[in-house]
Image: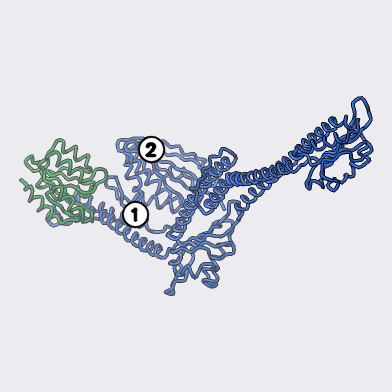
Amino acid sequence: MNRDKKVLLVVDDNIGIIESMDMLFCDDYRVLAASSVTEALNILGGIKPDIILLDYLMPGLNGIQLLREIKQMKMASRIILFTASVWESVREEVMDLGVDGFIRKPFDIWEIEALARGIAPAA
Amino acid sequence: MSRTTLQRKLTLLFGIIIVAVVLAVGGITVYESRKMLIEQARRTGVALAGNIAAAASNDFFNYNYIGLEQKAEEAAREPEVAYVILYDKEGQVAAYSGQGSADLPDSPDPLSAETTGTLQIFVLDGFIKGYGGRGLDILVPVTVAGTAARWGSVRLGLKLDRIYRRMSLLSWIVFALCLVGVFSGWAASALFTKRITIPLENLVGAAVSVSEGDYDTRIEVETGDEVQELADNFNWMTQELKKQRANLEENLDEIGRLKHFSDLVILSITNGLITMDRDGNIAAFNRMAEKILNTSAEKALGKSPNQVWGDTDAVSVMASLLQDEDSAGEVRLRWPAKDGGHRILEMGTAVIRESDGRAVGHIVLFSDLTEKKELEDRVKRADRLAALGTLAAGLAHEIKNPLTAIRTFVQLMPERHERPDFLEKFNRTVPRELDRVNNLLEDLLDLVRTPTLNISRVHVADCVGHVLETLEPEIEKRGVVVDLAIDADIQPVSADAEYLSRAIFNIVLNAVQAMPQGGTLGISSEVRNVPGEEKTVLINISDDGFGILEEHLDQIFNPFFTDKEGGTGLGLAVTNKIIEDQDGSITVRSERGKGTDFTISLPVFHTR
């Protein structure tokens, strides 16, 4: 594994999302995965990812709570929030919290790839 | 007027008493004075005659008629003496003070020969002829000392005119005094009467004022007697009356206010209200009743429902409610509306009873449910749409995740299909995600379809055993200890064995998944037998895993609610439906960090 690769953390409770994002980004980024907010916080204790792909709605602590934690930790990580939710109000809520990208599932892979490369170009 | 009469009566009474007393005193005085004066005159006359007799005794003894004549004339010179006659012992006139025999008074009968022959003294009160007025005719015997024989008699006429004049004067004085006494007595009695009657008159006047409503009337009497006592009592009584009156007025005001208030309550009550008297005629009819029944109170009051609305179905329903004396009835009925349609009324009746339980009428209370029911229908439709929206959103959320994964792999296919790691992950992920979508749809269908249940005699122990067998790998993987306490002899339940197993499976799986680091899975059963309730079997499934947040407890049976990573949120919704379809129920208790406790309750099987 190339140590110079930028780090991308996927936080989602769906194993399918983690597997597909890993497949999509594994060539250009070092991909880490967390299936819950608690797990993500464990990882963030040691590693500062360049990009975090964060699911909005998760059981237990949800994406918004993790987002607040990350903002409080004043981390430099760029955050892309994605959601399967159909509610329109989600976008306003997360934009107010200061995310770098917002994308709804199911998304086009080129769309999320462009978004990721735009905010944190692969080395 | 009666008060004048009282005064007059008293005055008259006192007057009569005073006149009688004064007249009696006056009469007695005059009578006694006269008696005394006459007696005095008699004694004087007798003494005078005695003196003459004593002086003339020698002349009688010596038959000295000249001496006798002298003595008679001498004696007659006394102004009070009218005449003096001296008789000899034969009763013949021996001397006479008068001027001739013509003047000689007649010998009054008692003083005739018979009397002149005795030694007694005679006094005769009468009219003296010779003198021409009233006088005393006195005859005194003449005796000579040393002899017992009568030698002659002295007859003396004593004038009484002076005495009569004095007596007349005295009578006038007494009369005058009587008049003064009568008048002053009359005046005194009038004053005295007034003294009694004036306070009484005041009392009467005060009583009239009080009777006309002036309770501030007071009588000031300082007589210190019963009249004052009466006045004081009157004043006290007036004060009491005033207080009572004030209380009464206050009570009347209060009653008036209450009446007004209850009238307002009846009028303003937002339900329709009719009261009926004992004869079934309408006694009260409030504004809302006018509006709902589209009938004016004026038209309804005093009449029976039949008279007001005719013999309609609604009226007969009302009548049947009213006939139910014992209990308050309540019913929904359709009341004809003026547009030809119907209004839906909810109507209740109650019997109005006196405190002794006697029925005195009825209350009919009703409300118009027409709009409420329309609103309810609208809300139900909206609720259905909202529920559908929530369901659709939940479903979309659950499908979009696998779709995202599948789409990513599909889009990467053209450029990576030759890479073995891609193909390997493709083959693992895509079918699984497709299955996930399919399972999701199956669960959803389970949730909405009405299953064909095969209800039979089911032993809980069999179902639990089957579930534990299936889940054994999951249990072992996590190192979960099973604490099984199912009584093998417990009464069978009435259920569909396959569906019950699915329900138990879902709950046990949740419990096991809640203990990734191991723990204790408890499964037990008991019979619940509460009098008056159906006998049931309780299946209790507990874990000491994560537990459920309190605020999530009432949502866990909602479709698409999940607090489990990768959960669809349909498991418990389906489980709940399965159990309810079998006439059972599920309850849950949980504490975050301590574990969760599910209890399935199912009716005991019994052959009918």
- Is B346 situated left or right of B88 in this image? left
**Label 2 secondary element:** strand
Residue B430: mark in rendering: none
Name the subunit of mark 2.
B
- Identify residue type, mark 2: Leu
Judging by the rendered image, the residue that carries numbered circle 1 is B443
Name the subunit of mark 1.
B
Residue at 14 percent across and 35 percent down: it is A46
Residue B223 seen from this side: yes
| Discs 1 and 2 carry the same chain letter | yes
Residue at 79 percent across and 38 percent down: it is B76
Give the colour in which the image draws chain B: blue
Residue B477 seen from this side: no
Which residue sits furthest top? Answer: B146
- Is B62 situated left or right of B157 in this image? right
Residue B521: mark in rendering: 2
Residue B424 % position (x, y) = 19, 49
Q: How crowded is mark 2: few (under 14 residues within 10 Å), some or many (20 or more)?
A: many
Q: Which of B248 and B542 is in front in this view?
A: B248
Which residue sits furthest bottom? Answer: B340
- Identify residue type, mark 1: Asp
Residue at 74 percent across and 43 percent down: it is B161
Residue B219 % position (x, y) = 52, 45
Query: Residue B52 sits in which quadrant?
Result: top right
Residue B267 % position (x, y) = 44, 61
The quadrant the N terminus of chain B occupies is bottom right
Which chain does green denote in the image?
A: A
Distance in Å between CA atoms under marks 1 and 2: 25 Å
Q: Which of marks 1 and 2 is nearer the N terminus?
A: 1
**Label 1 secondary element:** helix
